[in-house]
Amino acid sequence: MDFEHSPRAQALLRQLDQFLQTYVLPHNAAWHQAVQDGHYPPPFLDDLKTLAREEGLWNLFLPGLREDEPGTRLANLDYAPLAEAMGKLSWAAEVFNCSAPDTGNMELLHRFATPAQRAQWLLPLLHGTIRSAFAMSEPDVASSDPTNLQTTVRREGNELVLNGRKWFITGVAHPACRVLIVMARNADGEDEDPHHQHSMVLLPMGTPGLEVVRNIPVVHHHAPEGHCEILLRGARVPADHLLGEWGHGFAMAQARLGPGRVHHCMRTIGQCELALALATERALERRSFGHHLADYANVQEWIALSRIEIDQARLLVLRCAWLLDHPEQVEPAAVRAQVAAIKVVAANLQTRVVDRAMQVFGAMGLSPDTPLAQFWTWGRALHLLDGPDEVHLRSVARHEFALARERLGSLSAYFTTPEQMRTPPRL
Ligand SMILES: Cc1cc2nc3c(=O)[nH]c(=O)nc-3n(C[C@H](O)[C@H](O)[C@H](O)COP(=O)(O)OP(=O)(O)OC[C@H]3O[C@@H](n4cnc5c(N)ncnc54)[C@H](O)[C@@H]3O)c2cc1C
């Protein structure tokens, strides 16, 4: 396993860093002011996108792009440091057309869209002229188990009809959001096994029967792109809006999450790096009781632990990216377990590292004046979004048990138990 990034990725990283410093960061204050004033997205976003595209910093994430699709075609391992760099600024990824949930949706469309769907939705997404959302979770059922989902899709003549309620759907409030990929239970699917009862439907925004009820704040943080509750009351689309095959929604949802998790985790690592850097500088400058905070052993320990944990996490995520890039060399089950593992590691890393940084900053760390409060909120959300930690831990454990079952009994030589203890006594 080699985690060295290719020369091309290293050059792109230098270029991206330069671009962020020269064009994006200088707009950061204006971005937040514009959002606060209700001007979202700020007018300079399109100019930044045009510039990024002209510089070749566009769609950095999708390795398997076709000839006619714009982007860099980097492997997951090569994209990882770029995602880390973009992650430091909550809005930077959109400048390079690399923001969630569009990235995952583009992957999904790339794999499963018909030529007509590709032309209507995938190409505009790849060109950054529209945005999208992925609607799976529901308020009425435990959505960590997708077999629970209750929103229905009914085939009626040459149409599909959707009914139900979804929530926390990221991206719906973005003015450029034009399409939702809705995961719904097949009205005629009761006889199928639980993993073949759901389908995915492309639902254009503005379809009659689709209502955006509210944008739900996350720990009181209002995201302008939205984590929205939506209501579907007889929302009707032509039958050709089915994405993939009828009843295959479950497997498609699984397929969507692999590289997307690497992206999330690397953005998290970028945020943790920034939190650590901010905390370290603050500790060197701030004095209390006659000493700099950096002189106190507990602060030193926080800084050291954060450094160690970030480096550990990065290695694990890079390993996972490498595994995704080499499917021929690894069992799919092993890759799935790794993808689950990094999600847990990243969420825990972010809340721990950012929490320590907030403590170093004192009250300021909880204010909106630093990025820490927003990073912590996102870290807290990361324990749940794309599935809660506990479900991922369950996947990792299941994989371990599957391996153990295969080799059951093969470790007996490691025991030094006396012979008479190995056979049950005759009574
Ligand atoms: C900021 C944010 C953005 C989101 N964006 C989207 C989006 O764009 N699209 C979308 O569809 N959804 C989105 N979600 C929703 C998210 O995916 C769900 O919240 C998540 O899947 C968990 O579902 P739930 O909230 O229904 O929790 P539940 O399923 O009710 O689970 C509650 C708790 O039960 C426990 N639990 C559940 N299963 C197990 C188990 N097997 N073992 C042990 N414990 C268990 C866990 O502790 C879990 O936290 C987002 C959520 C947040 C916070």
Image: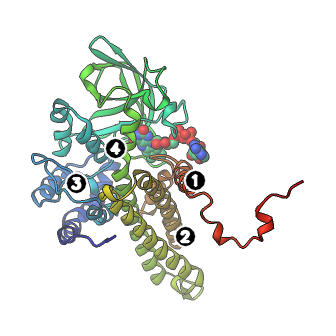
Q: Is mark 2 within 8 Å of ligand 1?
A: no
* 316 left or right of 417 in image: left
Point out which mark residue 63 bears.
3
Give the secondary structure at mark 4: loop
CA–CA distance in space, label 3 to label 1: 35 Å
Q: Earlier in the sequence, mark 3 or mark 1?
A: 3
Q: In the image, what residue occupies the spot 9% across and 46% down? A: 68
- Mark 4 or 2, nearer chain start: 4
Q: Amino acid at mark 2?
A: Gln
Q: Are marks 3 and 4 in contact (CB under 8 Å)?
A: no
Pointer 1: what residue? Answer: 405
Mark with earlier residue (3, 4): 3
Identify which amino acid the numbered label 3 is placed on.
Pro
Q: Quadrant of residue 409?
A: bottom right
Label 4: few (<14), some or many (≥20) within 10 Å? some
Image position, residue 83 (x, y; %): 30, 61
Outermost residue on the top side: it is 157
Q: Which mark is residue 225?
A: 4
Image x and y of residue 420, in percent: 80, 66
Tell me which amino acid carries mark 4.
Glu
Q: Residue 182's spot in the image, x, y percent?
A: 36, 31
Determine the CA span between mark 2 and mark 1: 45 Å
Q: CA distance from mark 3 to mark 4?
A: 26 Å
Q: Of the residues shown, which amino acid type is indicated by label 1?
A: Arg
Task: Assess whether mark 4 and mark 1 are in contact (beta carbons under 8 angstroms).
Answer: no
Q: Which residue is mark 2?
A: 359
